[in-house]
Image (spheres, grey):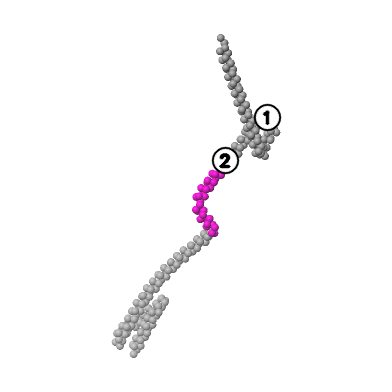
Amino acid sequence: MEENLILEGLLSMVTELKEKQEAQVTPASREETLERLNAIEQALSELHSNPAILEKDLQAIRSQLDDIRNGMQGQQKHIEDTKKIALETYRCFKVMIDALGSCKTDKEEAAPLPLYQRIYNKVASWIRPELFLFSAVLVICSASIFLNVRLAERMQQLQDNDMKYRYLLMQGQAEGETFDMLENKFKWQRDNGFIRSLTDSVMDFEYRIQKQAEALERARLLNEQAEQLKKEADKLGKP
């Protein structure tokens, strides 16, 4: 009768351990479970020599104990796998957090540009070579125009001086009042109408002087020819 009570107690303990295992107890109760298994195996060893206990009952308890041990090994392997997965997940999560932190820092350091600044940078990257060529051509054209203007001013000054000199030759005199009048009309208070009239007068005078010079030259040549003919006639008239 006592042996049956012990056997029932062992069965109750084994059943309780199996229920805890199926309920997936925490790893902290593993030591407690191992102690109970050892106590049950020791009790089974003591009952094995008792003929009053049936072998099949002992075998059933041992079978359940083996299932519990196998389950504990599976649970231990599952726990180790879970730890590995947790560590790997933590590592990946940490890498992700670091990457996000770095990306956030980069974004904070490189503040987004305003829309007009982004448009300007885009357009500038497209037209920078063309803008350089256009600037070079513009500088060359500006320099050429400036030099041409200066050259035109210099040529105009030379023409004015030439015309003033020719006017003085036409007048046959060079007085202070005449110089002041010419400087005022040509430079300080430029009078284009006066300059055109003066130019026409000088050119007409020079034209008439040229015609007179040509007439005098023709007359001189005619006189020379007449004298030459007279000399030849005198030579022919002598016996």
Q: Quadrant of residue 72?
A: bottom left
Amino acid at pointer 2: Asn
Depicted 155 relative to depicted 223: above or below: below
Rendered location of residue 79, percent (x, y): 39, 73
- Secondary structure character of the magenta stretch overall: helix
The residue closer to the viewer here, 32 or 70, is 70
Q: Does the magenta stretch include residue 130?
A: yes
Q: Is any part of residue 16 visible from this angle? A: yes
Q: Dot 1, how many residues are within 10 Å of its Cα: few (below 14), some (14-19), or many (20+)?
A: few
The residue closer to the viewer here, 65 or 179, is 179
The residue closer to the viewer here, 164 or 217, is 217
Rendered location of residue 140, percent (x, y): 54, 44
Q: Quadrant of residue 82?
A: bottom left
Q: In which quarter of the image is residue 39?
A: bottom left
**How much space separates mark 1 and mark 2, taking CA atoms?**
36 Å
Label 1 or label 2, whichever comes before in sequence order: 2
Depicted 126 relative to depicted 154: above or below: below
The residue lying at 45 percent from left, 67 percent from top is 93
Image quarter (top left, top right, bottom left or bottom right) of the C terminus: top right
> In screen coordinates, is 41 left or right of 106?
left
The residue closer to the viewer here, 208 or 9, is 208
Which circle, 1 or 2, is nearer the viewer?
A: 1
Task: Give the SS element for disc 1.
Answer: loop
Q: Which residue bears the numbered disc 1?
A: 173
Depicted 88 relative to depicted 235: above or below: below
> In screen coordinates, is 106 left or right of 84?
right
Amino acid at pointer 1: Gln
Image quarter (top left, top right, bottom left or bottom right) of the N terminus: bottom left
> Which mark is drawn over residue 148?
2
The range drawn in magenta is: 114-142
> In screen coordinates, is 95 left or right of 239?
left
Rendered location of residue 145, percent (x, y): 57, 42
